[in-house]
Amino acid sequence: MRITGYRTLTTVQEWGRPVGDANGLFADGVVTVPIVMVDTDEGITGVGIGPHGGLDTVFAAIEGEDPRGVTALYDRMLRQTFKAGHAGAVFGTIGALDTALWDIKAKAAGEPLWRLLGGGDRRVPAYASGLDIGLTDDELVSVYQVYAQYGLRAAKLKGGLDIERDRHRLNLVREVLTEAGHGRRPGLMLDVNEAWSRKQAVRHVCELERTLDLTWIEEPVRRWDAEGLAVVGRGIRASVATGENLTGLEQYRPLLATGAADIVQAAAVWGVTHFLRVSALAHAHDVPVSPIGNTPVALLHAATSVPNHMVSELQDLEPPLGVTLDLYVEDGAFVLGDAPGLGLTIHEDTITAFTHRSNTLTADSPNVRPEQAGRRLLAVGHVVPGRPAEAGVARDEVAGRFV
């Protein structure tokens, strides 16, 4: 079997509501989802979800090769890009191709990827993650009531801009999940997406912990700040979770060596091989791992085969437009199916018929770091134009300004 070519598509995740984090919002709730499809001379096509940056350059490393040698091909892609660097979008391209190759390998074997990788249980524990910072109280409660109907008893909220607002919102979700769990204490996490300085992080979390039991605080300071993450970890009771934006084992090593990460994360767009290697490194330090991403299907398969998987992120309960998945959510877990490969089907006609918006980044996008991040003196909040501000939310139409 030989790799003969690739195709790209871009679809969207349609949330039907604003989504975002401390850095900004997609007010229309529409998020682009890039897809790579790798073809072979035996008619097997693999699918990967991730960026397309530098695709021609990266693909040259694997063209004409046997896709079943996926681990060796992953290292060839890293070597292909080492001079310019394999971080960021290029690392995502490598991850998308890597995921597609694992899909091909499992399809060729006639097995779901979770079984090919040696997983013994198709059920993968999940937590709810609504990208919910732009929601009103009523919307927030409604969203997590739906998650609760699927048996989810842990939730990660977006926050970091206002202590009292975060406390209020966490309490609302705690009540929803406690009621659904018949009085059992739920898991609560807060993700601030690198919005704080070290002192801000300790002060903010310690104040929350006067009345709340937080399972973890996610990305409290910059992703590469091993010393800062360790300082935060020593100053609070909650665990520190980080790693979703790290793009190589060399970036994880100092965090684990200094005890800066209590829970190691890896993003779905970085690929299966990356996740397996990160999991092994974390396991050597007795640290659990937790995959993140809106469509983390490849890492769900991989999670079944690693001994230190804790829980995986469940964002939207619906897949991206034109994508179907051989899995379902039940009793607080993803349940993987028996379809060969990832169990991911792409409906190309549906995707190509959709009119896409521009991918141009705006200043209020979650993908653009606000100028004052880590240096804010007073609380700020998100207001979506045309939606009412609530108590505790700044009446400022531009996220990140002082008020």
Image: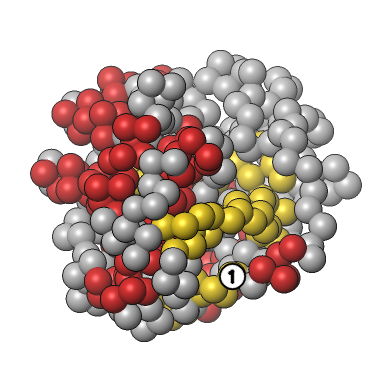
Residue furthest to the bottom: 338
For residue 336, what is the image quadrant?
bottom left
Residue furthest to the right: 386
Quarter placement of the N terminus: bottom left
In the rendered structure, the answer to whether residue 286 lies left or right of residue 90 reads left
- Asked whether 247 or 95 is in front, the reply is 95
Q: At x 64% / y 56%, what residue is drawn?
A: 9
Q: Residues within 10 Å of mark 1 (few under 14, many from 20)?
A: some
Estimate the x, y position of residue 104 in percent, counting from the top left: 38, 66
Q: At x 73% / y 58%, what residue is drawn?
A: 17
Figure colour scheme: secondary structure
Q: At x 19% / y 70%, what residue is drawn?
A: 118
Estimate the x, y position of residue 302 in percent, counting from the top left: 30, 62
Residue 48 visible somewhere in the drawing: no
Q: Is residue 392 above or below residue 42?
A: above
Quarter placement of the C terminus: top right
In the rendered structure, the answer to whether residue 218 lies left or right of residue 370 reads left
Q: Is residue 203 above or below residue 21?
A: above
For residue 398, what is the image quadrant?
top right
In the picture of the structure, the residue carrying the numbered disc 1 is 346
Amino acid type indicated by mark 1:
Ile
Estimate the x, y position of residue 249 in percent, counting from the top left: 26, 35
Estimate the x, y position of residue 116 in percent, counting from the top left: 25, 71
- Asked whether 7 or 350 is in front, the reply is 7
Residue 176 visible somewhere in the drawing: yes
Secondary structure under the numbered disc 1 in the rendered image: strand
In the rendered structure, the answer to whether residue 184 lies left or right of residue 152 reads left
In the rendered structure, the answer to whether residue 251 lies left or right of residue 284 reads right
